[in-house]
Image: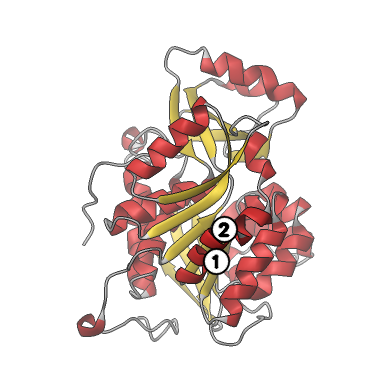
Amino acid sequence: MAEVLGWEPRSASSDSMAHEGILMGMGNPLLDISVAVDEHFLQMYDLKSNNAILAEEKHVPMYEEMANNPNVEYTAGGATQNSIRVAQWMLQIPGATTYIGCIGKDKFGEEMKKNSKLAGVNVQYYEDESTPTGTCAVCVVGDQRSLVANLSAANCYKSEHLKRPENWALVEKAKYYYIAGFFLTVSPDSIQLVSEHAAAHDKIFMMNLSAPYICEFCKDALEKFLPYMDFLFGNETEARTFSKFQGWETENVEEIALRLSRWPKASGTHKRIVVITQGADPVVVAEDGKVKKFPVILLPKDKIVDTNGAGDAFVGGFLSQLVQEKSIEDCVRAGCYAANVIIQRPGCTFPEKPDFN
């Protein structure tokens, strides 16, 4: 299997466990404010289910309305932070992961620090004194969700923080880097620093298409960093949006994944592998001119509590095996396992220990 996809795992005898700081994430740390709402609520705030957008003026009252809901739930979130927390949970090795982003100096920021440290992630937040910690409204309708991010402090990350010797040492220590596409609107110069470092030192750099609006409005930035990407993740809607704005005139997810995998690379050391999830349909993996499909773990509808964070959890599970140099098949299996656990719980939360072999 691994040979078919060109990603050769270590033999069991030489397989060494992931070590401290091997995986680094950079992104927008947001406190998720999760509430079950109805279709009327979505219409009132001009929202679509199964979508992610940035907050506008018209969305501001929504946050207070949700915070006043007696069933509101708060979780440390943001796409990259979710994936890193899940990878850390799957690895069960304290400090195997590092995460960098910007929060405010406030109670939400303190809550986030506490949450992430409890999860075993080595968080190095840049703290902005004048801007509140970013939040994400998670509007849950049945088993679908609509995300509205108010980036606030998350939008204030500066590459100067990354260049500080103690933080750049974490970049140098890591061998795998993961950044969601959402960070393209915040600190492209930080992405450039990390992607160029990865290419120069034969390390693995990975990104995610993240949302249809990133594929549309950050098209140039995505194209700039695509050559550096050794792995690219996304879902079927994002893949089709990327294809549309490239003028590829195809909605075939396998074809789009193949074309993305063939995009020229900055470094010839690793071939690019593209991984596209499709909800309950098989995961599409494209690499080296071939496509392989992997079935997901299907759940009866009544077991699905909340799909928020399912894509992030898939990536986290996948990365937990990748950093141990397991086969792509094992990486996808772990991704499907993690996503399966997360959708049976509210928000991107998980039990104390994973049950994955």
Q: Position of residue 152 (x, y in %)?
A: 66, 34
- Which corner quadrant of the image does residue 137 belong to? top right
Please name the residue shown 62% across and 41% down the image.
154
- Image disc number at residue 206: 1
Residue 214 in view of the camera: yes
Q: Position of residue 212 (x, y in %)?
A: 67, 49
Between disc 1 and disc 2, whose residue precedes? 2
Name the residue that disc number 2 marks: 179
Q: Is residue 201 above or below residue 254?
A: below
Left or right relative to 280: residue 46: right
The residue type indicated by label 1 comes to Met
The quarter in which the N terminus is drawn is bottom left
Q: Is residue 32 above or below residue 88?
A: above
Distance in Å between CA atoms under marks 1 and 2 = 6 Å
Q: Is residue 333 above or below residue 278?
A: below
- Image disc number at residue 84: none
Q: Position of residue 151 (x, y in %)?
A: 65, 37
Q: Is residue 106 above or below residue 322?
A: above
Q: Position of residue 36 (x, y in %)?
A: 47, 22
Secondary structure at badge 2 equals strand
Please name the residue shown 40% across and 43% down the image.
116
Discs 1, 2 touching: Cβ within 8 Å? yes
Left or right relative to 170: residue 116: left
Please name the residue shown 62% across and 70% down the image.
195
Left or right relative to 221: residue 348: left
Left or right relative to 242: residue 73: left
